[in-house]
Amino acid sequence: MRKERKIDLRPMLKPQSVAVIGASNNPDKVGHIILNNYLEEGYQGRLYPINPNDEMVMGIRAYKSVLGIRDKIDLAVIAVPAAIVPMVLEECGRAKVKSVVVVSGGFAEVGETKLQDKIVAIANKYNISMVGPNCLGVMDPRSRVDTLFLPTYKLTKPKVGGVSFVAQSGAVGSTVLDLIAGEGFGLSKFISYGNAAQVDEVDILKYLMNDDETKVIIMYIEGVKRGREFLEVAKKVTRVKPVVVIKGGTTDAGVAAARSHTAALAGSNQSYEAVFKQCGFSIAKDLDELLYFGKAFASEMLPLGDRVVIITNGGGTGVLTTDAVYNSGLRMAELSARSRAELSRSMPSTVNVRNPLDLVGDAGIERYDKALSVLSEDPGIDMIIVIALFQTPGADEGLALRLAQYKKAIKKPMIVISIGDKYTRDRVVLMENEGLPVYDSPSAAANSLAELLKYYKYKKGIV
Amino acid sequence: MRKERKIDLRPMLKPQSVAVIGASNNPDKVGHIILNNYLEEGYQGRLYPINPNDEMVMGIRAYKSVLGIRDKIDLAVIAVPAAIVPMVLEECGRAKVKSVVVVSGGFAEVGETKLQDKIVAIANKYNISMVGPNCLGVMDPRSRVDTLFLPTYKLTKPKVGGVSFVAQSGAVGSTVLDLIAGEGFGLSKFISYGNAAQVDEVDILKYLMNDDETKVIIMYIEGVKRGREFLEVAKKVTRVKPVVVIKGGTTDAGVAAARSHTAALAGSNQSYEAVFKQCGFSIAKDLDELLYFGKAFASEMLPLGDRVVIITNGGGTGVLTTDAVYNSGLRMAELSARSRAELSRSMPSTVNVRNPLDLVGDAGIERYDKALSVLSEDPGIDMIIVIALFQTPGADEGLALRLAQYKKAIKKPMIVISIGDKYTRDRVVLMENEGLPVYDSPSAAANSLAELLKYYKYKKGIV
């Protein structure tokens, strides 16, 4: 059965027409929330609510079945009780619906494996690409497809960007999605595929590999069903774009928990880690790192070596960042004689010309400018960490925007560390919206740069 | 000389009267910002600006010298050029000023060691306790003492609480202080002591050990000058309250950077780590952990063992937290037969009764209530991690407040994990303000509980 599947996720993510099966005027119903998403987010395609009783749903003409629609349906979102999913899916097949997202639960995750097998067979029979069941589904901020049935006021939706996020778990999916909304990089696709009855991580990776809107893939997975295919596809993906992965169930206790959660064959941590490394994946140890690494890759920076310079307006933060660079496996660069001479000439006597370069607490734009113009040209430096602590008198919006200009102008990877409460966070948003990655901890910054280099080396075949 | 010092920090942190030497009507001057802090924050003691030229400073009668004041001065804040610090300090001595904070730079950190020795000699001669020079100074939100010369709009000031923060570095000091403002636990004392010419970490620990307002001490240090005294005092402190420390300069590169920063004898990392462990300190690997651990200790929770239960409304987050518990060195608890029976009876069939206990995405207050009432009584459970993901329909303010009630009612350590953007963060503030520690990452949560247990064992002499 598996081999005959013809999976195409494009009609699901870029549909010209969407049917919402189970759409309802009752605001407590999942089908209501999903239809409301399409309306609120201004979906531009043709929209068809399916409801057996009501003639109108949320002000739109409703149909009793997809069979009644005289239009080609690219995507049907199915939000009806599990028992009647086979029937509506059969109707979708006869109506030549191209893809479905089954958000309904009540299948293999509660032991109803036969019911799940049944819907897979129907989907395969009609060449329907099916995500789910028991999933949050998909989101694409460009096409404004959104099958998530969570209250919109509880979840900030991310802006358009280049990071696609694949999460088997709906809980991890929705929380990380919520966090992505606060990041500068923005979202390309979100796919939460639940029980993975038909479409699985292999199909999703294949699609995202060829999706030009996706620059980086970040994933949460608990297990992989088709190991050999996964390995094969994953290796192809990392030739064209980076993948960051976090695995749920990396310890014995965690594996047992994962088995109870998605019935995933979580396997041993060692074997997964080996596979991920072989594929050139970046491995995140925690959800924080999933976002930290994703952020670095999203800026599409390419390091050519491991030598880092640190420019700071805070001595102690420079010390901690030096420790973090060393611990990440990167090296502190040696400034060239020319850099040292130029900096000694232009900096005040309180600035000790070395690496980390401590511009001292009263530094403003001028000193950062001199440091960056000299050090971005130093051939002994591969990457730049700028620490900008906005609690000091000289650091303000002007500095934030200037740093963002440098990021665009120079070729070497450059990231910023800024740590603080509201005033700082507002400046961080400024920088991130200009494409400059900002970190709130020295180790996050250094470890993210180290991942960039690992990926670069993997692609070049150096490791 | 050292042995004859009589250090008393009480007049500095709880002064009845404060002189600001260098107070100015010019808003760009450090002395202006400091005087303004006292006025803005409503300091209730007697305030004396010292300015050689102006009769009034910021609407208050000014004096040409502390010698002109007919009052006993508990604290003089000195913000004048380095060259005239000896003169004004000598005047402080003759006026019987009890303590001084020298914020002025231009001493040992730029090679002026003789000038620094001179002011130490004057302070010792007159039994003045002196913090600095080259420091941010001190803050106490209860007495409203605040010598920080950073623009107040750039730095959110923390509320009153039980955590005292000692930071040699002003940069680390001000950024972490800014972050503490966003935490529920609040600040007892902030002491940033710069060159540590006279008062050093040993004196500060001695004071904080006996300070009833201080429940927890968190520290950033780059080096210790009086090793033996430090060890002796530190061991006494951890008998009465926990200390969390982060060391700047734990790698060769970092040690070199620290030497250039505060001329600290940073020493080898191994020897420091050994000393810290011997003292029963909690060692933070990054600034995040300094706050994470501080937050757990601030809630004054006492674990009696290493068996953790996880209650969650998100399966994947439960899996990741299980991994984190295992990796932290703690154990997943086995639920008692009685707990299992009671939960099986009261939970819907979608809830699989095991640890982690996944209440499933549609859980509301009722299910959390049942889980907590049963598991808080289970003798096989030592600590409770509650995952509350507020993106789900059933999780709201009501749940946040109920969880905070449980925290107050039960004896076992209990913390929460909530991850998300604005809606979630507002609920997190609710919980934290009620004294319930909330973490934004599984590993932060698990590692913090593990630190509580380590400290408990240290105190009991188990390790």
Image (cartoon, coloured by chain):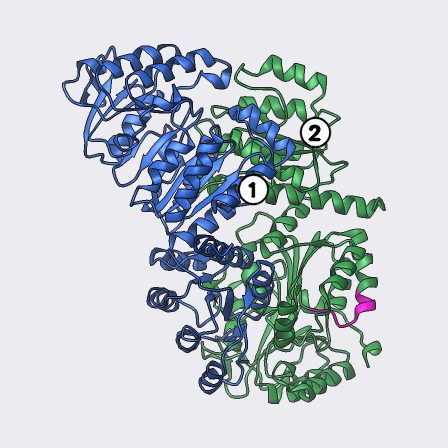
Chain colours: A green, B blue
How far from the left and from the top, in percent, is residue A462? 84, 44
Q: Is residue A396 left or right of residue B153?
A: right
How far from the left and from the top, in percent, is residue A429? 52, 43
Q: Nearer the viewer, mark 1 or mark 2?
A: 1
Q: In which quarter of the image is residue B129?
A: top left
How far from the left and from the top, in percent, is residue B297? 41, 52
Q: Is residue A379 left or right of residue B433?
A: right
Amino acid type, mark 2? Ala
Q: Classify mark 2: helix, strand or loop.
A: loop
Q: Which chain carries label 1?
A: B
Q: Which of B247 and A457 is in front in this view?
A: B247
Q: Is residue A238 left or right of residue A43?
A: right
* Magenta stretch holds residue A225: yes
Do circles 1 and 2 both sit on a common chain? no
Decide: is B5 above or below A134. above
The region drawn magenta spans A223-230
Identify the residue under disc 2.
A333
Amino acid type, mark 1? Ala
Q: In which quarter of the image is residue B367?
A: bottom left
Q: Residue B274 carries which label?
A: 1
Q: Which of A109 and B336 is in front in this view?
A: B336
Q: Mark 2 lies on which chain?
A: A
Which image quadrant: the N terminus of chain B?
Answer: top left
Decide: is A193 above or below B242. below
Decide: is B298 above or below B378. above
Classify mark 1: residues with Cα within 10 Å, few (<14), some (14-19) or many (20+). Answer: few
* Magenta stretch holds residue A88: no
How many angstroms separate mark 1 from mark 2 (CA)? Answer: 30 Å
Do we see residue A387 in this rendering? no
Q: Classify mark 1: helix, strand or loop.
A: helix
Do we see residue B87 in this rendering? yes
Q: How many labels does the image show?
A: 2
